[in-house]
């Protein structure tokens, strides 16, 4: 399976903000953005560099792709699905990305990052409505119940991730029973509940050209 193997801290520095790709490291003073808040590479510290319109649109798309850990082909398919649905394409796009099993597993606190969540899903550590699902791109529907298997519930890394997530709080569209290692995907998130730094409108303009 194809994966993006670019160093995660370089990805954050390229986008100029924390993308929360490295679990608890992103919340510590070891975060690369805290120490080097400029793009990677020998020209990273150049100031005044101005992006073209295409560059602005591309950066907006790459940022969303990197946050959710999807490749270009996957992203295009999700965009096409969002565009075919009723409602606003941009909001549909973000909802479909958040409804992915790996993204929801992360939001539920079962993993410290989306990359860890994908690994947990791939390694048969997650049940959806009582059935084992090992496909990270599986799309959850409102009312679906996601829970840790007995084996994964005992992992120290999973326990630490749950404790950290509980201390920070969970999203409104998810209900989590921390002790049971079980959560319910209550509804698709509203745009107002997602990060305001994402600019899905630029992605729509990019794909409309």
Image (cartoon, rainbow, N blue to C red):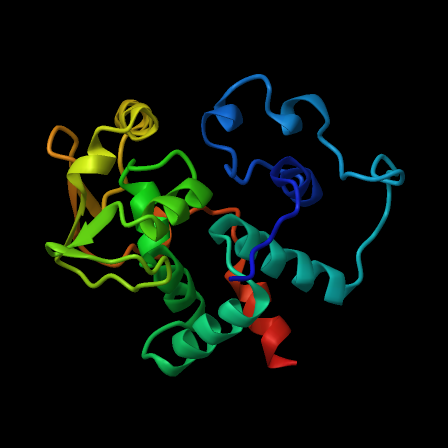
Instruction: Identify which residue is drawn at 68% across, 38% down.
Output: 13
Q: Nearer the viewer, residue 157 or 189?
A: 157
Which picture quadrant has residue 169? Answer: top left
Instruction: Identify which residue is drawn at 16% across, 53% down.
Output: 186
Residue 120 position within the rendered picture, expressed as x and y whole percent measured from the top left? 34, 44
Residue 98 position within the rendered picture, expressed as x and y whole percent measured from the top left? 36, 55
* Quarter occupied by the C terminus: bottom right
Q: Is residue 113 shown left or right of residue 204?
A: left
How many circles with numbers are drawn on the protein?
Answer: 0
Instruction: Identify which residue is drawn at 29% across, 22% down.
Output: 167
Residue 64 position within the rendered picture, expressed as x and y whole percent measured from the top left? 53, 55
Q: Nearer the viewer, residue 19 or 138?
A: 138
Q: Is residue 158 shown left or right of residue 204?
A: left
Q: Nearer the viewer, residue 170 or 71?
A: 71
Residue 30 position within the rendered picture, expressed as x and y whole percent measured from the top left? 60, 19
Task: From this view, report whether residue 4 is shown above or below residue 166.
Answer: below
Instruction: Identify which residue is drawn at 53% across, 47% down.
Output: 197
Task: From this view, report whether residue 24 is shown above or below residue 141.
Answer: above
Task: From this view, report whether residue 88 is shown above or below residue 23.
Answer: below
Considering every residue shown, the one lying at the far top of the view is 29
Q: Nearer the viewer, residue 137 or 188?
A: 137
């Amino acid at each position: 399976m194809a994966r993006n193997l670019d160093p995660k801290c370089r990805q954050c520095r390229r986008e100029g903000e924390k993308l929360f790709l490295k679990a608890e490291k992103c919340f510590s003073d070891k975060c690369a953005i805290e120490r080097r808040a400029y793009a990677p590479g020998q020209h990273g510290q150049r100031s005044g560099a101005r992006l073209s319109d295409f560059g602005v649109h591309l950066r907006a798309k790459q940022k969303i792709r990197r946050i959710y850990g999807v490749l270009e082909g996957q992203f295009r398919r999700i965009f096409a699905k969002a565009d075919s649905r009723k409602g606003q394409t941009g909001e549909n796009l973000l909802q479909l990305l958040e409804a992915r099993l790996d993204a929801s597993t992360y939001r539920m606190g079962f993993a410290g990052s989306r990359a860890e969540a994908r690994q947990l899903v791939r390694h048969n550590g997650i049940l959806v409505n009582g059935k084992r699902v090992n496909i990270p791109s599986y799309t959850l529907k409102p009312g679906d119940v996601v829970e840790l298997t007995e084996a994964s519930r005992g992992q120290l890394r999973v326990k630490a991730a749950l404790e950290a997530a509980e201390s920070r709080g969970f999203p409104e569209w998810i209900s989590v029973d921390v002790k049971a290692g079980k959560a319910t995907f209550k509804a698709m998130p509203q745009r107002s509940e997602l990060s305001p730094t994402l600019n899905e409108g630029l992605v729509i303009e990019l794909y409309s050209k």
